[in-house]
Image (cartoon, helix red, strand yellow):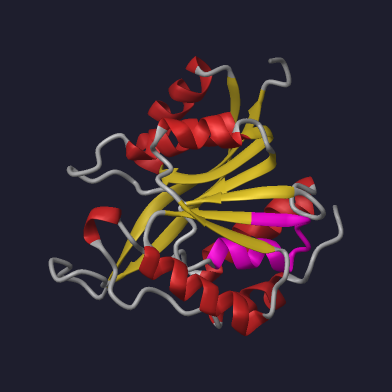
Amino acid sequence: MWPCMKLRHLEELLQQIDGFDNPKLLLEQYVTPSHLASHMLHTIQAHYGDIDSKLIADLGSGCGGLTLGTAALNAGLVIGFEIDANAIQICQNNINDQEFSNIDIVQCDITSNSFVSRWFKMFDTVIMNPPFGTKHNAGIDMDFLKKGFALSNNVIYSLHKSSTRAHVLKFAKANDVKAEVLAQLRYDLPTTYKFHKKDSVDIEVDFFRFQVSKNP
């Protein structure tokens, strides 16, 4: 086990973070629940030591839940990449409230080719809770994952619908990346958009760890 903040303290910190005021459906904006995010980040550090003192990217950082949680676990520097200006403003307010100094936020389109060329293999660890890919965004989850493979020189941690597990494993193998499902979790998705009919929906998600090849 690696040195790590207590799980309870991490979850309490993440519970204080403000979420989206007006989430955008086309960007599939959902807040990563504090319970899920804290367990995810605690595992990354306590079991693998992949946060403390590391250079870390959070792809699709949104309001900053995973970003701030990573900073709290003593990342050397965590850079959140986010396309939406409103989400970035909320994230910046959260950073200011918590007074973190080891966070930078970059506004950009993660799906663009120029994104990879600028940040290729710069990060020790990449974390993400990518869009799952609705009918409007089919395949965006794998696009995010491929960008993560390109940015990391070591490991990537990501959440994906359990129903897509076989596809994710096949995708990783095709990209010469070692994939492991660390846990199957329940994503408690609260009512966020007008078309949601239930108060909340539990979605089964896989918590993946990907190890990229050290060879060029």
Query: Foreground: 161 or 145?
Result: 145
Q: Is residue 71 magenta?
A: yes
Q: Residue at point 68% right, 73% down?
A: 10
Tell me where the magenta segment starts and ends, as one range: 65-78
Q: Residue at point 56% right, 35% down?
A: 118
Q: Residue at point 61% right, 84% down?
A: 97
Query: Foreground: 48 or 108?
Result: 108
Q: Quadrant of the C terminus?
A: top right
Q: Quadrant of residue 90?
A: bottom left
The reply to whether residue 12 is in sight is no
Q: Is 20 situated left or right of 145 in this image?
A: left
Query: Foreground: 75 or 43?
Result: 75
Q: Residue at point 40% right, 42% down?
A: 162
Expressed as whole percent of the image width and height from the top left, the position of residue 95 reads 60, 75
Expressed as whole percent of the image width and height from the top left, the position of residue 123 reads 68, 40
Q: Is residue 146 above or below residue 65?
A: above
Q: Is residue 144 magenta?
A: no
Q: Is residue 80 above or below residue 215?
A: below
Expressed as whole percent of the image width and height from the top left, the position of residue 170 reads 45, 21
Expressed as whole percent of the image width and height from the top left, the position of residue 161 reads 38, 44
Q: Is 33 situated left or right of 124 in this image?
A: left
Give the tally of numbered discs: 0
Q: Is 163 situated left or right of 174 in this image?
A: left
